[in-house]
Amino acid sequence: MGGCSSFVKDAEVKEYTAKALEALKVLEDESGAGNDFLGWKHLPTQTPESLITDCEAIRDDWKGKGVDLVVVIGIGGSYLGAKCALEALSHNFSKQLSTKKDAPEIVFAGNNLSEEYISELMDLVQERNVACVVISKSGTTTEPAVAFRIIKQYIETRYGKAEAANRIVAVTDAKRGALKSLSTQEGYRTFVIEDNVGGRFSVLTPVGILPIVLGGFDIRAMLKGAAEMEAACAVASEENPALQYAAMRNLLYAEYGKKIEILVSFNPKFQYLGEWWKQLYGESEGKDGKGIFPASVLFTTDLHSMGQYIQDGERMLMETVVTVEKASRSVIIKSDEQNLDGLNFLAGKHVEECNAMAELGTKLAHIDGGVPQLGVSVEKIDEYNLGQLFYFFEKACGISAYILGVNPFNQPGVEAYKKNMFALLNKPGYEAQGEELRKRL
């Protein structure tokens, strides 16, 4: 956290480290608010091998059927973790490459109510050999339920009901809910979302594991990385990385008015890491009139848009920079005889060296501009390191929210828009509220 040293006092760091140690104890003792939603804490070390082999069996079955497109339906935590992993681990241009892929393309639905999106998705599925994974505890959340109704009907019409049961897998509640009932009725293969794991902490459950396996990636390596981070983040010590991060961000928020935290990456593969992280922290901390507002940017791209504000705008910002130490590919800049662009001083350098110097230069500029810098570093982008990142941010989130004094595991504010939407759509039971709302429009 060296990028914060010029902003804070040693005594303050000591004070907030003590607060973080207390919060960690509450989390480890499972004595805090929301303690019935702590099933995520030991997923890396307690995930059974049978779960992975069951996911691999579906992968192999669908491969045998020639499935080349899997529609994963879910919203919020039911898709962001898997989307993050697949975007991070995939070739940037996998969709454009002509070489045959060993794994199916994974696309996502049920995360919006755009008619254009679902229509264009149907254009795609009609050209492909398709299967579906639907993720929902209840089966009645509007966005995924609408998408699943449409995709289910299409698969049944195209392949017949018997074959549709082989092409639809549900990740849902163990015993109750509309999706569980439908799965039993239709004979879908199912995976369980345990009651003690909330959606935004579910990436290392079947919610994330199944799409990651279907995408052709090594989930065992991801769980190994997460397991090592689980051990590191359980230690009641100032060296605990999750504790350090939680303490510093709360110190900057409470004592210096840094109310917005920007997650920064200099690698476009981490765009959806930012999206996953925003839900994790926004939904966990943004309540009771409190919380750091989470935002994300990709540099150097956004230095040419958001960079001006970050450098010179209102000083309520802090940044957390996720550094990737090693690139997995190599491109060297060559000399040019004319040198019209004036870049021969870069000849012989790797493009990633330029990226690294941009990162260091940005750090110094933003610190000089009044923006504290927190840092998180991974060796490279692969399953192991991504597993470490997932668990690190989850554990730090629990600690941070307890320092803040809120329940990290509920989300009461999410229901407000749903009630209004149901009323305006004339859902039975919401007629009176709908009439009142229409008077305001």
Image: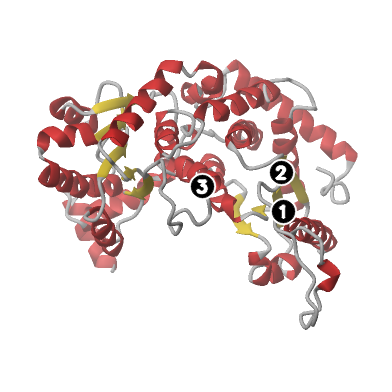
x then y, percent, for residue 94: 47, 53
Tag 1 residue: 318
Q: Residue at x 28, y 26 (%)?
A: 190
x then y, percent, for residue 403: 66, 34
The image quarter containing residue 67 is top left
Q: Is residue 14 left or right of residue 68?
A: right
Of callouts 2 and 3, which one flags the residue occurring earlier in the amino acid sequence? 3
Asked which secondary structure carries label 3, the reply is: loop
- Examine the rendered structure and indicate whether residue 12 appears above or below residue 293: above
Q: Residues within 10 Å of mark 2 (few under 14, many from 20)?
A: many
Determine which of the numbered discs, if any, sits on residue 374 in the image: none
Q: Is residue 205 left or right of residue 262?
A: left
Q: Residues within 10 Å of mark 1 (few under 14, many from 20)?
A: many
Tag 2 residue: 249
Query: Pointers 3 and 1 in contact (CB under 8 A)?
Result: no
The residue lying toward the viewer, choosing from 417 and 387, is 387
- Examine the rendered structure and indicate whether residue 224 appears above or below residue 354: above
Tag 3 residue: 90
Q: Quadrant of the N terminus?
A: top right
Q: CA distance from mark 3 to mark 1?
A: 30 Å
Q: Quadrant of the C terminus?
A: bottom left
Q: Kindly tell me whether residue 260 is visible in this rendering.
A: no
Q: Residue at x 65, y 23 (%)?
A: 228
x then y, percent, for residue 297: 62, 58
Q: CA distance from mark 2 to mark 3?
A: 31 Å
Q: Residue at x 11, y 32 (%)?
A: 162
Q: Is residue 206 left or right of residue 436?
A: right
Asked which secondary structure carries label 2, the reply is: helix
The residue lying toward the viewer, choosing from 254 and 382, is 382
Asked which secondary structure carries label 1, the reply is: strand
Q: Kindly tell me whether residue 379 is visible in this rendering.
A: yes
Q: Residue at x 44, y 35 (%)?
A: 208
